[in-house]
Amino acid sequence: MNTYNPHIPAKCTVTGTSAVEAESRAESLVRLLQFGDSMFPIGGFSFSSGLESAVQKGVVTNATTLHEFTRTAVEQAARGDGIALIAAHRAATASDVGELMRIDEMVYVRKLSEETRAMSVRMGKKFTEMGVHVLGAPLLRTWQDCIRKTLSPGCYPVALAINFAVQNLPERHAFAAHQYGAAAPILGAALRLMKVSHVDTQKILYDLSGQIEASYERAATARLSDMSGYAPLTEILAAVHTKAHVRLFMN
């Protein structure tokens, strides 16, 4: 039986290369860029993470308020899904499918609105499917079976964690990809929803990316029970969006 400590970073040995060695390889960087790309075909571009309602209701009106909104989303992701992602990466490294299912359920029940649940599950299922086709790793196939048999919801952060773990990509890289993925789609949506420039959005993304390392250090030592994402206005905006008559984005 596989055992692991979720509070201690695991050393991946899937391909005989340690996580430290993998972190310095150019190939690992390329894989991070590929699977961490905000345009990776899993449907993330079709969601605005509540920004559409925020613009419609006047909560986000310019580059300054967009920066604040995106920062809130990124911080919420780090304190919630980010903690689960790290735990799932360690469980995947230990091939502990039962623990992956437990983590996946904990992520799902913390999604308060219908659309945030739908977003996480749809992206997670698609990410798993793409991983099976591109990588063909046995653990990814097992996880896809769990989703198909409705044994587990299949949330996005868990799928991302498994994908990176089977490639021997460090949990730090998985966390970075996750946080980048929390910000980039919002900023991409902003270009279609409001008067903001590419320069504005790139400046915001650059600033928020500088906080990833500190966020990782906090999440890496947190317990699953520490998962939280208190941002009531964001949840309200998501609920408003569900009832909206005119929508450009699914969420």
Image (cartoon, helix red, strand yellow):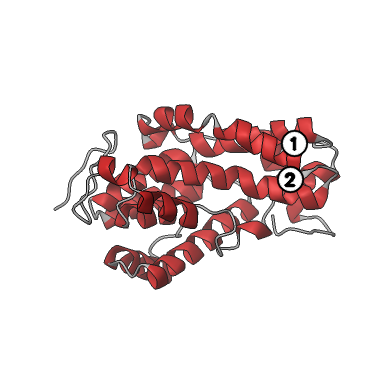
On screen, 243 above or below 111? below
Quick check: 150 left or right of 9? Answer: right
In space, the residues marked 1 and 2 are separated at their CA atoms by: 9 Å
Look at 40% across and 60% down and name the residue there: 152
Q: Is residue 138 left or right of residue 240?
A: left
Horizontally, residue 62 falls left or right of residue 104, namely right
Secondary structure category for the residue under label 2: helix
Q: In which quarter of the image is residue 14?
A: bottom left
Quarter of the picture holding the C terminus: bottom right
> Which residue, as the protein is rendered here, is positioned at the far left?
1
Give the residue drawn at x 36%, y 43%. Answer: 171
Check contact, mark 1 vs mark 2: CB within 8 A: yes
SS category of the residue bearing label 1: helix
The earlier-in-sequence mark between 1 and 2 is 2
Q: Nearer the viewer, mark 1 or mark 2?
A: 1
- Label 2 sits on residue: 51
Mark 1, residue position: 66
**Residue 231 visible to an observer of this rendering:** no
Rendering coords of residue 115 (x, y %): 64, 55
Q: Quadrant of residue 63?
A: top right
Q: What residue type is labelled 2?
A: Leu
Q: Nearer the viewer, residue 74 or 202?
A: 202
Examine the rendering and report whether any part of residue 213 can be seen. yes
State the residue in front, 118 or 78. 78
The crowd level at tag 2 (other Cα within 10 Å; few <14, some 14-19, many 20+) is many
Residue type, label 1:
Leu
Q: How crowded is mark 1: few (under 14 residues within 10 Å), some or many (20 or more)?
A: many
